[in-house]
Image: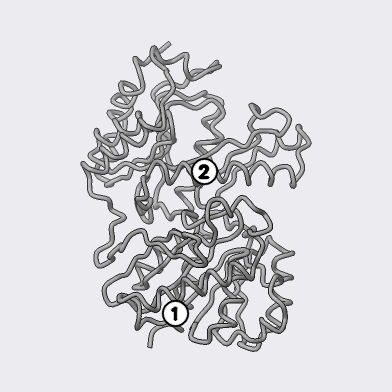
Amino acid sequence: MRVFTDRRAAGEELGAHLQHLRSEDPIVVGLPRGGVPVAYEVARALDAPLDVIVVRKLGVPYQPELGMGAIGESGVRVLNDEIVQLAQVGRAEIDAVETRERVEVERRAVRYREGRPMLTLAGRTVIVVDDGLATGGTARAAVAVARAHGAGRVVLAVPVAAAASLPALRADADEVVVVEAPHNLSAVGQYYVDFRQTSDEEVVDLLRRANAAAPDPATRPGVDRVGEVEIAPDGARLRGDLSVPAGARGVVLFAHGSGSSRHSVRNQQVARTLQNAGFATLLFDLLTPEEALDRALVFDIELLATRLLVATAWVEAHPRCAELGLGYFGASTGGAAALLAASDHPQVRAVVSRGGRPDLVSADRLASVTAPTLLIVGGADPEVLRLNRAAAAAMRCEPRIEIVPGAGHLFEGAGELERVAELARQWFLHHLPG
């Protein structure tokens, strides 16, 4: 049985097995926490940039140690249908577990990157690295995240993996590289002399060191990330992130959905697409961290719309944005807040709603929206599609409904969020400049 001294040694050996990818200019992403020390050595061996993909196991409600699937950034969810059926877990139970774990996904993504944006994976060869795989559920979710971010090719690389898990992994990834593939793997730790737990602090330190050593390819020429800003409506201190490209075509304010924040990886991905198209973006928190714990406030659309209007006034007064056309991008309940705010602010030139809840806005207020409105809904989200069609019938601005085939409420399938971003880009390009 092959045994590695520690994760660093395993990463050095794995890096030697991946030298054939050096010419592809890859990006290495580690699975926190234990996969990051391995990925750090792989990135060093390939002179490649390093990032993380944050995934979380979905445990069966009454037996959390039994994984029924995993979730990752960009709304990705991978389920083990066999476990779900055997455990008789219902849709509502799965959604409840996912909601809880998704908060942790976003928290860790922000914590590990220290506010830096995720590296741009679009069109790149992405090497997903972990310290070992038993069933491979979290690795499959990580591969799906890389695909959702537009990776051109995805390679899964681990020092040790159960042989039985490899066929499914090879079906998901373009290539699987494994140093040791035992037929009777019961615990990954058996293949390490030192398998002590990796801390959050170690993950942050390794990413910081890698970031200092290699330029972030997500840094886009001409985009000035103004940085964190603070907006204070009614004494509440709301934080946001403002980016303004040179010669900006317009500015888009993001209104996030319930249970989310300015750190929403889905909204950040759409924002990057808009920034690359020449739009300034403001992603900000509609609620303070304390307010976000109050479910009544999370669904208080009047409050959220008021906060959005305060942020709009702040943007209009900002010297970098004062002359730019205004647009709103809202998701879920944020879509309702965007429409309600637009009904009170005729200077808003365009609205895009992703999986929005326009039913939370009264018909008379919907009829007051004058901005051209694009309602994007998943084809596999029939109830929200019905609500959007009913709302569109009440609007006078001739809204357009775009259906993303097969997409659910979170647009978690491969390429679905990219389609959302592209639709938003085209809509704002058509309606904002001028």
Q: Residue 54, position in %: x, y?
A: 47, 41
Helix, strand or loop at mark 1: strand
Helix, strand or loop at mark 2: helix
Q: Residue at x 27, y 28 (%)?
A: 16
| Horizontal arrangement in the rendering, residue 346 relative to residue 90 (left or right) | left
Disc 1 residue type (three-letter): Leu
Q: Residue furthest front?
A: 235
Q: Residue tagged by mark 2?
A: 105
Q: Residue 144, position in %: x, y?
A: 51, 46
**Disc number at residue 380?**
none
**304 versus 54 height, above or below:** below
Q: Residue at x 71, y 84 (%)?
A: 364
Q: Name the one closer to the observer, 152 or 232.
A: 232
Q: Quadrant of residue 47?
A: top left
Q: Name the one closer to the observer, 265 or 255.
A: 255
Task: Calculate the distance from the C-alpha at mark 1 to the C-alpha at mark 2.
Answer: 31 Å
Disc 2 residue type (three-letter): Val
| Horizontal arrangement in the rendering, residue 104 relative to residue 226 (left or right) | right
Q: Residue at x 59, y 82 (%)?
A: 343
Q: Quadrant of residue 226?
A: bottom left
Q: Residue tagged by mark 1?
A: 326
| Horizontal arrangement in the rendering, residue 276 relative to residue 312 (left or right) | left
Q: Earlier in the sequence, mark 1 or mark 2?
A: 2
Q: How are the residues colored?
A: one colour
Label 1 Cα neighbours within 10 Å, binned few <14 / some 14-19 / many ≥20: many
Rendered-image quadrant of the N terminus: top left
Q: Residue 265, position in %: x, y?
A: 48, 54
Q: Residue 240, position in %: x, y?
A: 42, 61
Label 2 Cα neighbours within 10 Å, binned few <14 / some 14-19 / many ≥20: many
